């Protein structure tokens, strides 16, 4: 596995400045603003998973949105596959952006409710000019649906006709259609039942192994993070207070804040996540179909 960073973030800083109200302006008051991200640096080698953890409001989603290009940074650098986004020409930037996709907590808000699933998944194929022939598009949609564990007939249905877990599978199929290489996952399974959550996490890891995907993974559930992450950064009030391999962060945390975060997680759930992770790597390449419930069986009650 390559160790060249696919994503490199350096001294990333974001200040949210509140809009001034009329009353505030008349009173001569300045809004104070929130330094949501303060001088944060990390990198993710291609094919690996970096998790950002931290309490609510620590800046995790802000980091995700900055890397996805959905909000603008105030300072710092974002490099994707060795190219500095700020210095790239517009065509290169667009091409890089395509290689970065997001998977959100609630797929319902990211899937157009009036579109059939086939249209939702094929939209990036057409918009990005990846395929134009109708038959080829239909075949690719069917292939993607099957890859995420759905049926090709599901292309004709609407998002509301699916369960939450199935909707997240549709969002993942759409991300695959765009041929994403870096996937930013902001609480991708937090809205799901534990057993469904395990299936989606296994699917994400299968896809990572198969396609060499790089993940920036955000979850408040540290057992989930232990199962998914190679490396972890701990955010507190916008600053990275500790970073290291998952083994180091869980095994030998240094910062009192990290200790406090870990103290809030049942030990059994972390142990189960470690066991599930080891079981996966012990058995080599896996497929969702041959090993459907790996964590579901082992960890469902703990996650
Ligand atoms: N658009 C915005 N305008 C103003 N302040 C914002 C905006 N987005 C986020 N913030 C503030 O920035 C800080 C970091 O928010 P962020 O959403 O990144 O936290 P988070 O770690 O994702 O939290 P959670 O775990 O609750 O999702 C918070 O204080 C938040 O109120
Ligand atoms: Mg958030």
Image (cartoon, rainbow, N blue to C red):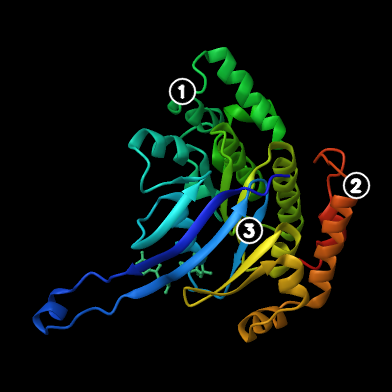
Q: Quadrant of residue 175?
A: top right
Q: Is residue 16 above or below residue 167?
A: below
What residue would you read off at disc 3? Answer: 50
Mark 2 / mark 1, whichever is N-terminal: 1
Q: Is residue 231 above or below residue 185?
A: below
What residue would you read off at disc 1? Answer: 129
Which image quarter is the N terminus in?
top right
Residue located 83% across and 64% down the image: 274
- Foreground of the two, 56 or 166: 56
Q: CA distance from mark 1 to mark 3?
A: 30 Å
User: Please, what secondary structure does the residue beneath circle 2 have?
Assistant: loop
What residue would you read off at disc 2? Answer: 283
Q: Is mark 1 within 8 Å of ligand 1?
A: no
Give neighbour class at mark 3: few <14, some 14-19, many 20+ (Cα, 10 Å): many
Q: Is residue 171 visible?
A: yes
Give neighbour class at mark 1: few <14, some 14-19, many 20+ (Cα, 10 Å): few
């Amino acid at each position: 596995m390559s160790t060249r960073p696919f994503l490199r973030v350096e001294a990333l800083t974001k200040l949210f400045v509140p809009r001034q109200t009329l009353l505030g302006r008349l009173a001569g008051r300045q809004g104070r603003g929130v330094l949501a991200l303060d001088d944060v640096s990390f990198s993710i080698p291609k094919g690996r998973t970096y998790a950002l953890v931290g309490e609510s409001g620590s800046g995790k989603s802000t980091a995700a949105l900055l890397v996805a290009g959905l909000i603008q940074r105030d300072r710092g650098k974002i490099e994707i596959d060795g190219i500095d986004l700020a210095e790239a020409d517009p065509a290169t930037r667009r091409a890089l952006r395509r290689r970065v996709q997001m998977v959100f907590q609630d797929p319902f808000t990211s899937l157009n409710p009036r579109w059939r699933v086939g249209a939702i998944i094929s939209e990036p194929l057409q918009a990005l000019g990846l395929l134009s022939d109708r038959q080829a598009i239909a075949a690719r949609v069917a292939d993607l649906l099957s890859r995420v564990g759905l049926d090709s007939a599901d292309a004709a249905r609407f998002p509301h006709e699916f369960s939450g877990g199935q909707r997240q599978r549709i969002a993942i199929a759409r991300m695959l259609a765009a041929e994403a290489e870096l996937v930013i996952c902001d609480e991708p399974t937090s809205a799901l039942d534990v057993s469904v959550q395990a299936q989606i996490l296994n699917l994400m890891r299968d896809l990572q192994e198969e396609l060499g995907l790089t993940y920036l993974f955000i979850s408040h559930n540290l057992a989930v993070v232990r199962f998914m992450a190679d490396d972890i950064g701990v955010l507190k009030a916008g600053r990275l207070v500790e970073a290291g391999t998952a083994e180091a962060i869980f095994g030998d945390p240094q910062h009192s804040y990290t200790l406090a975060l870990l103290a809030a997680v049942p030990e059994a759930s972390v142990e189960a996540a470690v066991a599930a992770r080891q079981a996966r790597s012990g058995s080599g390449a896996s497929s969702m179909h041959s090993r459907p419930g790996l964590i579901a069986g082992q960890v469902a009650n703990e996650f």
